[in-house]
Image: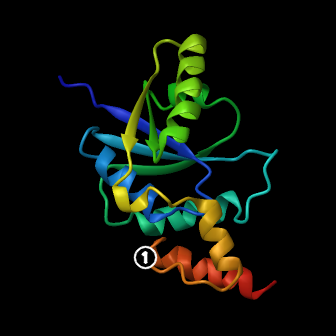
């Protein structure tokens, strides 16, 4: 019997961008199931609540099969283990991402050498894209069309029209 290859793709996804969706879609070519794990870090002040981020991810990935959206707090390695996975997916945009992610992957290996990190490079047209830039553009009523899924564009407009 073939063992199902399950991978966890963690992040804050505040908000999810088309770059994140690209990584998820491409990861599904490599793994049987992807668990998108929304980090609930009490030390950070996200624009969207965990519940809102999960809802946007669910809407943005409804065209995909074999995907689960969940949240976690605490140590990522514990979450990965609880999901019966041994793989963490990380997206890379630039060399600076690699340096940070490489250190994180090595530290994770020290803590639990049964969990591997797989890096997926983003498509070239998403190299510049990150959630912080999207939020800044939206805050100043800039156009985020094509940078984020339609539901995210709508939620950003709603969020910033209240301020």
The structure residue drawn at horizontal position 33% and vertical position 42%, both measured from the top left corner, is 33
User: Which residue is most to the left?
Assistant: 1
Q: Position of residue 85 (x, y in %)?
A: 43, 28
Residue 155 against residue 40 in the figure, above or below: below
Mark 1 residue element: loop
Residue 26 against residue 132 in the figure, above or below: above
Number of callouts: 1
Residue under circle 1?
146
The structure residue drawn at horizontal position 80% and vertical position 46%, both measured from the top left corner, is 42
Q: Is residue 78 left or right of residue 162?
A: left
User: Which residue is most to the front?
Assistant: 95
The structure residue drawn at horizontal position 73% and vertical position 82%, both measured from the top left corner, is 160
Image quarter of the N terminus: top left
Q: Position of residue 120 (x, y in %)?
A: 37, 41
Q: Nearer the viewer, residue 58 or 127?
A: 127
Dividing the picture into quadrants, the one containing residue 72 is top right
Tell me if mark 1 has few (under 14), some (14-19) or many (20+) residues whose alpha carbon lies within 10 angstroms of its own.
few
Question: How is the model colour-coded?
Answer: rainbow
Q: Is residue 73 left or right of residue 86?
A: right
The structure residue drawn at horizontal position 45% and vertical position 44%, both measured from the top left corner, is 91
Q: Nearer the viewer, residue 163 or 58?
A: 163
Image quarter of the C terminus: bottom right
Q: Position of residue 128 (x, y in %)?
A: 49, 59
């Amino acid at each position: 019997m073939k063992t199902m290859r399950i991978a966890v793709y963690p992040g804050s996804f505040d908000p999810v961008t088309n770059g994140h969706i690209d990584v998820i879609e491409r990861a599904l070519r490599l793994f049987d199931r992807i668990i998108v794990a929304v980090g609930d870090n009490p030390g950070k002040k996200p624009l969207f609540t965990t519940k809102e981020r999960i809802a946007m991810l669910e809407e943005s990935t409804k065209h995909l099969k074999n995907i689960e959206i969940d949240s976690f707090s605490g140590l990522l390695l514990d979450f990965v283990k609880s999901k019966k996975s041994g793989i963490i997916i990380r997206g890379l945009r630039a060399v600076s991402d690699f340096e940070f992610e490489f250190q994180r992957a090595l530290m994770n290996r020290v803590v639990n050498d049964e969990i591997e990190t797989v890096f997926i490079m983003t498509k070239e047209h998403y190299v510049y894209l990150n959630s912080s830039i999207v939020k800044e553009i939206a805050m100043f009523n800039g156009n985020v069309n094509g940078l984020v899924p339609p539901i995210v564009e709508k939620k950003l407009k709603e969020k910033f029209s209240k301020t």
